[in-house]
Amino acid sequence: MPMRERSHASSRGAQSAPSSLARAERSAEETPRVAPALERGVREFLEVLRVEAGLARNTLAAYRADLARFTAWASERGIREFDALDATAIVDYLADRRASGIAEASLARNLVAARISAPHLRRALPSTLSVDEVARLLAAPDGDGFLDQRDRALLETIYACGARVSEAVGLRTDSLEPSLRVLRLYGKGAKMRLVPLGERARDAIERWIGGKRMSIASSARTPEVFLTKSGRPMTRTDAWRRVKRAALRAGLPGDISPHTLRHSFASHLVEGGADLRSVQEMLGHASIRTTEVYTHLDTEHVTSLHRLYHPRA
């Protein structure tokens, strides 16, 4: 290549490089920075999904991408807080996404991601039972047969420790402390925590392990604490069904689940004056923000009492 041509080519390259850089800088200036409150809300929401819901990594990555797109869209319109979002804004966003030609399945996932942000989750307070309702539920398996012994031990364990259903059905006899003063619960990511076990739950477990559980031929070879009549370990679905059955026997709403007992455990501790950090540790929450929802529950409880009894409420 002649020197003059190379010189012209170099000149053209030198001119195009600043031009590309300028375009990139203009693009960066035109793209609004996502507000810190929105970024923080997304992080908290994803943490809730990871720790509490146990979503798979790929699912979390999909939600993360959806929410990054959504918060960028919101920032372009001057939205800086999740509280500033309303149904109209979300519908407009979904309309934009549909117009871009995304698949219906992706649009449906966008709807889930866009409608549920961390601040909204904290306002969507979990359903709980009163102390009297819990007592009725735990007393529902009142017989001495196989199912009643097992179900009573299961219910007492979930409420006494605030255990997730997966943690309860995952309990193993070979990991139980001899005195049963505490239980080792293995949560998300096989993270272990120690939770105190009350006297009633301890008695129920001992009665089950030393009683009807021994009637199963394979019980000595099966490490899981909670077994079915056929000798296999209980599944999460088994536990959900037994909790619902106990609720019906107790005359309580049919939508009660093992997680209702976990929420009740936490709210009763907070109402009784337990500090939030201790409740966080017992629940196995990675973030104190997840546990703070129970302070809102306590506030609502106090507010309802005030409205009910104060003469000027």
Image (spheres, rainbow, N blue to C red):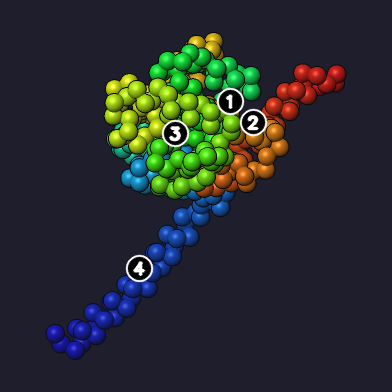
What's the residue at 52%, 38% (across, down)?
180
* Mark whose residue sits in front, 3 or 4: 3
Outermost residue on the right side: it is 311
Q: Is residue 269 above or below residue 245?
A: below
Query: The disc labelled 1 sits on which kind of residue?
Result: Thr
Q: Mark 3: give few (<14), some (14-19) or many (20+) Cα within 10 Å.
A: many
What residue is disc 3 on? 168
Residue 42 seen from this side: no
Image quarter where the C terminus lies is top right
User: In the rendering, at what x and y percent does residue 279 appear?
Assistant: 60, 41
Q: Comparing marks 2 and 1, which lies closer to the viewer? A: 2
Whether residue 250 appears in this view of the structure is yes
Up the image or down, 302 lies above or below 254; here it is below
The residue that disc 2 covers is 268
Circle 2 packing at 10 Å, graded few (<14), some (14-19), many (20+), is: some
Front residue of 261 and 288: 261
Q: Residue furthest left?
A: 1
State the SS at label 3.
Answer: helix
The amino acid type of the residue labelled 2 equals His
- Residue 128 numbered tag: 1
Picture coordinates of residue 183, whole percent (x, y): 50, 40
- Label pair 2/1, CB-CB below 8 angstroms: yes
Mark earlier in primary sequence (1, 3): 1
